[in-house]
Structures are given as C-alpha cells and as structure tokens.
Amino acid sequence: MRFPHGVTVTVLRSGGHDRYGNPLPEEEHEIPGCAVAPGTTEDVSGRDPRTTVDYTVLAPAGTDVLGQDRIRLPAPWGGTWQVDGEPRHFVSPFTGWHPGVQIRLTGRA
C-alpha cells in the first residue's frame, strides 16, 4: 500500500568487502510512498530509567529491506537509523492481499 502523502526513505546497505577484507562503499536505494510513525521504548529495570526514541516505517509491498540495513529518514525526523530485526511482511490468509512491510528502526546509526 502506498500512502498518497507518503515520504521517501533511503535504504543504506553494506557493499561487503573486497578480497583483502577492506569495506566496499555502501549501496543506496530509495523507497517512495512510506509512512513514518514515531515511538518510544521505556526501560525501567535498572537504577537509571531510560526512554529510547524509535520509529516504525510502513512501506509498500515488495520493498527491498534487510535486517542489517540502515534507513535514512527525511525531515522532520532526520538521521540514519538501524533496522531492528527483520522487516515484517503482512499477507491476508483469506485473500492473499499484501498491503505492505513494517520496518522497525532503533538507535541512530
């Protein structure tokens, strides 16, 4: 599902390493028509409670994102964020409808 007033996010993917072990440049591609939802996670288990800002990106079906990728968000969110876990693909068991992909982002990369 593309959002009519969605934004374009940029996926940053490792280019791997050359035969000598040196890192290769990152590869980039854009995903238009996304929605970005801010969120927070609270950790009150320790002596010093923490609140962490995170985001969820809702992207069109067929989006090419991997768990080790990073995502650059446009303004007003901004910054580069790490994909948290594997992107979640939703498919209806009744109709086969595939509305899109949910990508959780945490920690500025």
Image: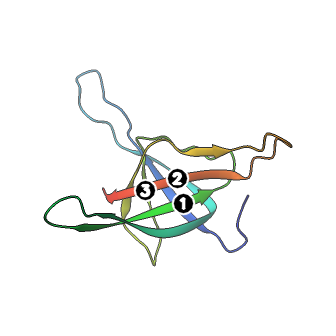
State the separation of the CA atoms marked 2 and 1.
Answer: 5 Å
Q: Of callouts 1 and 3, which one flags the residue occurring earlier in the amino acid sequence?
A: 1
Q: Amino acid at mark 2?
A: Ile
Residue 103's disc is 2
Q: Is residue 45 above or below residue 98?
A: below
- In percent of width and height, residue 32 lies at 63, 61
Residue identified by numbered label 3: 105
Q: Quadrant of the N terminus?
A: bottom right
Residue identified by numbered label 1: 57
State the separation of the CA atoms marked 1 and 3.
Answer: 8 Å
Q: Amino acid at mark 3?
A: Leu
- Regarding mark 2 in the picture, which secondary structure is present there? strand
User: Are the residues at dot 2 and dot 3 in contact (C-beta closer than 8 Å)?
Assistant: yes
**Other-residue count near label 1 (Cα within 10 Å), few / some / many at <14 / 14–19 / ≥20:** many
Q: Of callouts 2 and 1, which one flags the residue occurring earlier in the amino acid sequence?
A: 1
User: In percent of the image, x 51 and y 61: which residue is there?
Assistant: 56
- In percent of width and height, residue 27 lies at 44, 44
User: Are the residues at dot 2 and dot 1 in contact (C-beta closer than 8 Å)?
Assistant: yes
Q: Quadrant of the C terminus?
A: bottom left
- Regarding mark 1 in the picture, which secondary structure is present there? strand
